[in-house]
């Protein structure tokens, strides 16, 4: 089962009407590398890179009506900012605290969120950044070096093997490999099938199960995907509640509440604490915070 008609029909069942979208480019200031955000905004405008503040992101800016590429300035090469899609900037902001913590970035490459983690940590604590691809880890390492990240160790390791690290983590970011969405891939509808999505969902559950084994008792997991498909989002979170002794925590986040009714199946009501970003002007995105279930004594 595949094709535009099939997926558009699914989105309508989930309560969203498909419309073509035009994504807006976004950047994120690396606060540990700059002294004043407004000064940098003015400086970049003088180069022809015009910015507009994103109201739901503390260091996020839309790129608008610019005559220079955001990735072609000296300020970019010096690590003063990163080119990072707006919705993709959200997950890191949802941790309750990060300074001094031990953090696992379970699927880190190409490194945008890893840099953001280090930035929010002010280069304190430690980050273990994993990815399965050696080639992608090269890009990750380059990104970390450009942005002057000092608290991160990079490993080539599948997150499903993360217990082999023999470490417990206060915070875990699982930005899970996923099916993506049509907003960022013009050929998405013709290249994706329901079988692909179900296979990805199984891998995501395996990653979540193994990384959860590495979580401290009072730790937090942020789970996110750039998929619109409930198999990779709400259905996985419902599974985590019932199988992994995890619960969904409330988050202060834009977007629409997570779904509790999916294709005739009723899910745990706490899934409304999750957030969906239907495309426009961001890509499609899903994010959720998981903590250990609290049992009454």
Image (cartoon, rainbow, N blue to C red):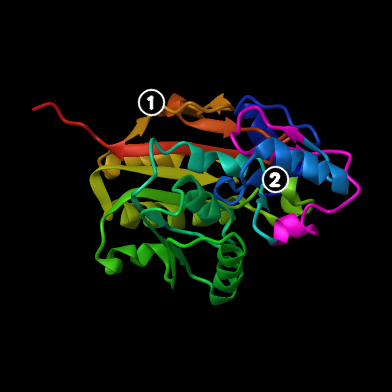
123 in relation to 134, above or below: above
111 in relation to 165, above or below: above
Q: Please tell me which residue is depicted at 79% across the width and 51% down the height of the picture.
A: 186
Q: Please tell me which residue is depicted at 64% across the width and 35% down the height of the picture.
A: 10
Compared across the picture, whether 293 is left or right of 233 comes to left
Q: Callout 2: 10 Å neighbours few (<14), some, many (20+)?
A: many
Q: Are marks 1 and 2 in contact (CB under 8 Å)?
A: no
Query: Residues in magenta?
Result: 52-77
Query: Which residue extends farthest left?
Result: 297
Quadrant in the rendering for residue 168: bottom left
In the image, residue 62 lies in the stretch drawn in magenta: yes
> In x, y percent, where is residue 262?
51, 30
Q: Chief secondary structure of the magenta span?
A: loop
Q: Quickly name the residue at label 2.
A: 27
The secondary element bearing badge 1 is classed as helix
Q: Quickly name the residue at label 1.
A: 270
């Amino acid at each position: 089962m595949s094709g535009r008609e099939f997926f558009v029909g699914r989105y309508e069942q989930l309560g969203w009407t498909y419309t073509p979208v035009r994504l807006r480019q976004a950047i994120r200031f690396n606060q540990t590398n700059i002294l004043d955000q407004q000064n940098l905004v003015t400086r970049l405008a003088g180069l022809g890179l015009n910015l507009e503040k994103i109201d739901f992101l503390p260091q996020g800016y839309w790129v608008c009506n610019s005559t220079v590429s955001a990735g072609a300035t000296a300020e970019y090469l010096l690590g003063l900012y990163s080119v990072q899609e707006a919705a993709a900037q959200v997950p890191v902001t949802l941790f309750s605290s990060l300074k001094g913590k031990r953090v696992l970035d379970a699927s880190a490459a190409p490194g945008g969120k890893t840099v953001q983690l280090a930035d929010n940590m002010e280069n304190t604590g430690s980050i273990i950044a994993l990815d399965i691809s050696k080639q992608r880890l090269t890009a990750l390492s380059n990104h970390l070096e450009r942005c002057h990240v000092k608290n991160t160790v990079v490993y080539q390791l599948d997150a499903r093997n993360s217990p082999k690290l023999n470490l417990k983590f206060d915070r875990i970011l699982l930005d899970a490999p996923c099916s993506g969405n049509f907003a960022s891939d013009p050929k998405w509808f013709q290249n994706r099938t329901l079988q692909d999505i179900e296979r990805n969902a199984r891998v995501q559950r395996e990653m979540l199960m193994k990384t959860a084994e590495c979580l401290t008792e009072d730790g937090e997991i942020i789970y996110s995907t750039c998929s619109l498909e409930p198999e990779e989002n709400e259905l996985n979170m419902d599974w985590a509640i019932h199988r992994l002794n995890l619960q969904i925590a409330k988050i202060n986040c834009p977007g629409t509440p997570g779904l509790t009714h999916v294709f005739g199946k009723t899910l745990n009501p706490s899934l409304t604490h999750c957030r969906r970003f239907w495309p426009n002007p961001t890509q499609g995105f899903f994010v959720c915070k998981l903590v250990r279930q609290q049992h009454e004594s």
